[in-house]
Image: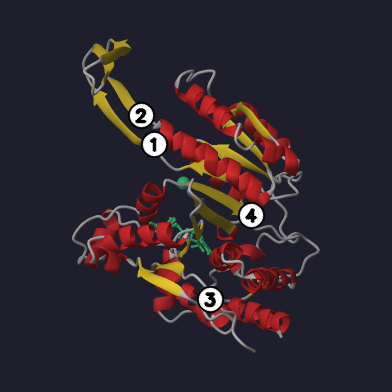
Amino acid sequence: MAKIQMKTPLVEMDGDEMTRILWQMIKDKLILPYVDLKTEYYDLGLLNRNDTKDQVTIDAANANKKYGVAVKCATITPNKQRMIEYPQLTEMWKSPNGTIRSILDGTVFRTPICIPAIKPVVKNWKEPITIARHAYGDVYKSVDMYTEEPGTCTMTFKGESGEEKTLTVQKVNGPAVWQGAHNKESSIRSFAKACFQYAIDTKQDLWFSTKDTIAKIYDGQFKKVFEEEFEAYKAKFEELGITYFYTLIDDAVARVIRSKGGYIWACKNYDGDVMSDMVSTAFGSLAMMTSVLVSPDGNYEFEAAHGTVTQHYYKHLKGEKTSTNSMATIFAWSGALKKRGELDELPELIAFGEKLEEACFDTLNAGIMTKDLVGLVEPGFEAKAVNSEEFLDAISERLAAKLA
Ligand code: NAP
Ligand code: MG
């Protein structure tokens, strides 16, 4: 069988630990036999980031902007403990995801992969819920401080024109904590655009929630910008029969729990951080959560939502068998290949991505799964725990049959 040809390379960002091991296996067993894979390869493994003084991450993000579609493996974000584990590190390098997000100015969309044998904890959820997390600012780019004596805290903005604006935050009569946070209107606008575009791409309703009754100016601006940006997408929404709906975050939480699912829930940075863990856990497992970063100018970076699965990697290094679920990483590849196929008008490549996903579902539906999922299976379904490699082999067998 002739291999499927590609036109434009995918930007391939390799990573760390167990996911790096799976990365190679996925390519070898599921992709390279069928696709004449064109990638521009960037090694985002921790040691190469260190050797290149993290330039490789910046280069990879710029390549993502140039070519449009990237697929990324999970990577270590070094902390104090990693500095001890890897004594050759010259710096506590920043989170690659953070670097890529700030270069692409993107919004992260996270969607659970659902199967009939695993029911969400919330029994009325029938369709996946996608969380769209704004990936810039608020508490993640805030400054905070602790003060001991009584006094007054003020907040001053100094305009380049020389004009100043000062507010009193609070007068206190004892020790206090303070925080200064911001967001940029341009980033909020990009967030809104990415959400409306993604709702159109996936033909799903879009919900957006903030707390504008309390943060009248701050969250009020988010609400206003979304309303303004929606004007440009309204006609397309009507044509597709999808809706945009704004509500308060506490009302949204109640509605989400009572809903059937099947929509995108756009959240501010902190809400998105928290709610995506809540939603993924309620749907089953972090190992079944896909993630795609979409930039307002239409660049895509596909990845798994989970990390590098360190404990499994150390077992692997000792020669022990692991039971690491590769679903989210495979779906990062299939998502990237499908998007590349769509942009380059390669129906064969799109069909390959779809068949790869079907082969994954067929494997799980046959009760073949990694240990993390076996414990979640509903009574009445059979499930057998397999190791990381056996799971990929079972998918490979089904994929081969589909493509024969
Ligand atoms: P993690 O790698 O997601 O793993 C946390 C635990 O979740 C694992 O120990 C494992 O539980 C379970 N798990 C996660 N993915 C799994 C999978 N595919 N199959 C089976 N079980 C899975 O998170 P972490 O331990 O907090 O972080 C490890 C490293 O990953 C850190 O260095 C962090 O910086 C990095 N990280 C990277 C990204 C990214 O690149 N996007 C995201 C998050 C974290 P059991 O051990 O109980 O089996
Ligand atoms: Mg989090």
Q: CA distance from mark 4 to mark 3?
A: 23 Å
Q: Amino acid at mark 3?
A: Ile
Does label 3 or label 2 sit earlier along the sequence?
Answer: 3
**Residue pointed to by mark 1:** 137
Cβ–Cβ under 8 Å for marks 1 and 2:
yes
Q: Position of residue 306 (x, y in %)?
A: 49, 58
**Residue 325 visible, this angle:** no
Q: Amino acid at mark 1?
A: Gly
* Tag shown at residue 104: none
Residue under pointer 2: 181
The quadrant holding residue 330 is: bottom right
Residue marked by disc 3? 26
Q: Residue at x 70, y 80 (%)?
A: 398
Rounded to the nearest angstrom, the CA distance separating label 3 from label 2 is 42 Å
Label 3: element kind: helix
- Say which label, 1 or 2, has the lower sequence index: 1
Q: Which mark is residue 284?
A: 4
Q: Give whichever of 156, 214 is nearer the camera.
A: 156
Which amino acid lies under the numbered mark 4 shown in the image of this protein?
Gly
Question: Does residue 188 appear to the left or right of 142 in the view shown?
Answer: right
